[in-house]
Image (tube, grey):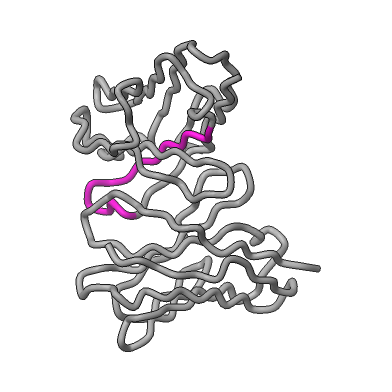
């Protein structure tokens, strides 16, 4: 299966620590998206890349959050100085440029900040 | 992007058709209707999308009213594995940023 993969699947950290998540999209997909989902809510858009360029960032993405896609392939999402409010599922998705709304999601990384 | 309204929850008997409604009365002419679902503890999964005409694929059918103010997702023979949250999204083409609402939690019962 060559779907979207995310690593790790689960992360428990203490408040104030930094965490980094990785997403490997479907290989031929130009677009890569990050979403965050809290319990009982639908996913919320965070940011997206077209190849290596980060084209849009949500206001939800505070200065503590940074995302990269250095070679237009995998992407990383880093959260610095984690807070309890960062506890959520972080979802990655990818799509073709020509079919941006048809997105393929990974299984997500569930973050718990203690 | 147009706001969508869905019932918070629905039940369906296994083997019967599940009809999930979505209201998008403010949809504009260039906005598509997309449906995704999210099975517990998994990422969302694309189901189907349409603009004006009814659409069918191996997963579901999408019926869009003539005035495009509402639509219905039909799962023709629901199984227990179709138990999930179903999201209806109205979005312009080439926007890329999906805006999810609360969705409809479909419970398929034996």
- The residue under the point 62% across, 67% down is B9
Q: Position of residue B98 (x, y in %)?
A: 35, 52
Horizontal side of residue A50 vs B78, given as left or right = left
Q: Position of residue B30 (x, y in %)?
A: 20, 70
- The residue under the point 57% across, 16% down is A13
Can residue A90 be found in the magenta stretch?
yes
Of A53 and A60, which appears nearest the observer? A60
Q: Quarter of the image containing the C terminus of chain A?
A: top right
Give the answer, above or below, for where B93 lies relative to B67: above
Can residue B40 be found in the magenta stretch?
no
Give the answer, above or below, for where B25 lies relative to A92: below
| The furthest residue to the top | A17
Give the answer, above or below, for where A83 lies relative to A14: below
Give the answer, above or below, for where B7 lies relative to B44: below
Q: Position of residue A17 (x, y in %)?
A: 49, 11
Please provide the residue range marked out in magenta: A88-101
- The residue under the point 25% across, 20% down is A70
Q: Position of residue B110 (x, y in %)?
A: 81, 68
Tell me where residue A99 sits by quadrant: bottom left
Of B82 and A83, which appears nearest the observer? A83
Horizontal side of residue A37 vs B84, given as left or right = left
| The furthest residue to the right | B110
């Amino acid at each position: 299966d060559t779907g979207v993969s995310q690593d790790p699947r689960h992360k428990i950290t203490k408040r104030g620590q930094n965490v980094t998540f990785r997403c490997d999209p479907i290989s031929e997909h130009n677009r890569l998206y990050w979403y965050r989902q809290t319990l009982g809510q639908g996913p919320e858009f965070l940011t997206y890349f077209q190849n290596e360029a980060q084209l849009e960032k949500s206001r939800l993405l505070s200065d503590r959050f940074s995302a990269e896609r250095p070679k237009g392939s995998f992407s990383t999402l880093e959260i610095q100085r984690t807070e309890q409010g960062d506890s959520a599922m972080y979802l990655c998705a990818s799509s073709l440029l020509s079919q941006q709304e048809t997105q393929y999601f990974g299984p997500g990384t569930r973050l718990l900040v203690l | 992007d147009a706001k969508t309204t869905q019932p918070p929850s629905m039940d369906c008997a296994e083997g019967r058709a599940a009809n999930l409604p979505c209201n998008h009365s403010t949809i504009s002419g260039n906005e598509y209707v997309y449906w995704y679902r999210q099975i517990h503890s998994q990422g969302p999964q694309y189901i189907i999308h349409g603009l004006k005409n009814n659409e069918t694929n191996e997963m579901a059918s999408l019926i869009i009213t003539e005035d495009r103010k509402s639509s219905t997702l039909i799962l023709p023979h629901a199984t227990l594995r179709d138990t999930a949250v179903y999201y209806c999204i109205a979005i312009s083409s080439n926007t890329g940023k999906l805006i999810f609402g609360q969705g409809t939690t479909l419970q398929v019962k034996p």
